[in-house]
Amino acid sequence: MTLDEILNAPSPASQWVLDSDCAENGLSPAIVKEAMRSRIAEMRDSVERGLASAAPSITGMVGWNAKGLWDAPDVLQAPLLRRVQAYAMAVNEENARMGRIVAAPTAGSAGTIPGALLGVADHLKISDDDLVMPMVLAAGVGKAISKQMFISGAAGGCQAEIGSSAAMAAAAVTELLGGSSRACVHAAAMALMNTIGLVCDPVGGYVEVPCVSRNAFFAVHAVSSAQLALSNLESFIPPDEVISAMAQVGRMMPLELRETAEGGLAQTPTGLAVTARMEGK
Amino acid sequence: MTLLDMIGPVMIGPSSSHTAGACRIGQVARQLLGQIPTHAEIGLHASFAKTGKGHGTHFALIAGLLGYAPDDARLPRAFEEAASADLVFNFETADLGDVHPNSARITVSGNGQTVTVLGSSTGGGVIEIVRVDGFKVSFSGGAFTLLTRYHDAVGVIAKIAGLLAADQVNIAALTCDRDKRGGNAMLCVELDQSLGEAAQKFLLSWPGMDWVRMVRPVMDAGIVAPVLLGTTA
């Protein structure tokens, strides 16, 4: 499965993705759709738990951000923005508390898709039933990306994780709002091309800082990409070429910036202090 | 790789590779032993050793040995659950050579048997088992996988392939390795369907056949849709 194949599929792209994956793996489309439906319910559950809890994570670095934003006044009067950010952080704070979440495609990037897709759907009062096929498309975009590039921070930096989740979310939101196959894939490509180079430098090696806030930022990033694509803006670089550019950058990225906690934020005095404190535990 | 690997697994946090993938490697080791082990020696390589503690990797591996899936709520309490299941375990840091940074070597024993598994967690909860008892293998836990250890001889693989064909089981991928010519060999066959229990017993009865295991899928497509993958269990 490539982005080019999805781009050239009849709209909506998700139907081609579903049929083609099921044929490849000998699965029934009805069962895959049912599994996606239950995963959407799991995502929603993790959003609700996350918005309601301010309990700190294992390290005490995160845990109250989603609830803090959700309970605060909407000073910008931008309810969609606030909702998308809060949902995304809710999932990643649940993750940091060893709660139950849906990896999408990884646990560290698990908040981006629920943030963007559930956030937009709730803002526009769209039911969860209508999210099943967009979620199938998100998975198809992820599969196309993983064919050319790793999706782990250890292999390709944060761009490989959050870039993938943002591209998947961008395509899903675009389809949800009636975008063509072409628009969905260009939304994914624009999300990816604007994530290239992002490093994975988690403080203490924990999936907390910057991961929780990063999911809030990249859920918004995904919605921005969908907005451009739905207005018929496109990525100048063809989508599959964007993936290969990202893979190339991932290969050039030093080991220190690939989930080892040996560079960036992890090596700041505050980051090192957290590492020392947790090693003492 | 299926769509359900990209949106999924449903899992206990915090890391798909360090937690969910680690749990799945443990699930495979348990199945290769054929029971919950009474003893486990676990060597953690590179990133598993370095950042495993903060990611629940230790809990997840033990949870897998107990047979829990990555979304099992008992995962964070796996050490306590192991104590009540009489599973004794030990972790150490190990240099496992030229393997993925997220890798573990697990030696499990129980009921007079011992198996050593080397597995890697390659991202998003996807795993690859690369060694069993020192033999090179390659399987992902996405399908039913038949593993056999036997005395290296002419025609053994042909006979096994014939048995699979007779049982209407299709081969998806196959790897084999041996310690020396005429020595011990291992065959690892990923299948589209499960080989029936009677056929497994028949296979084990062959002269020169030491050990047979059928590993059930640990990845979601194989769990969500087992009927379509050829089993009614």
Image (spheres, coloured by chain):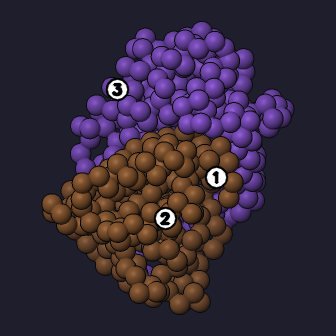
Chain colours: A purple, B brown
Estimate the spatial distance between the alpha carbons at disc 3 and disc 1, rounded to whole Å.
Answer: 39 Å
* Disc 3 element: helix
Q: In this view, does A25 lie above or below B187?
A: above
Q: Mark 1 lies on which chain?
A: B
Q: Which amino acid lies under the numbered mark 2 shown in the image of this protein? A: Phe
Q: Do labels 1 and 2 share a chain?
A: yes
Residue under the image location 65 percent in, 43 percent down: B228
Mark 2 or 3: the one toward you: 2
What is the total number of numbered labels drawn onto the structure image? 3
* Disc 1 element: loop
Residue under the image location 72 percent in, 40 percent down: A31
Label 1 or label 2, whichever comes before in sequence order: 2
For residue A146, say whether it is visible. Answer: yes
Q: Which of B42 and A105 is in front in this view?
A: B42
Q: Which amino acid lies under the numbered mark 1 shown in the image of this protein? A: Thr
Q: Which of B132 and A208 is in front in this view?
A: B132
- Return the mark for residue B231: 1
Estimate the spatial distance between the alpha carbons at disc 2 and disc 3, rounded to whole Å.
Answer: 49 Å
In this figure, which residue is indicated by the disc labeled 2?
B202
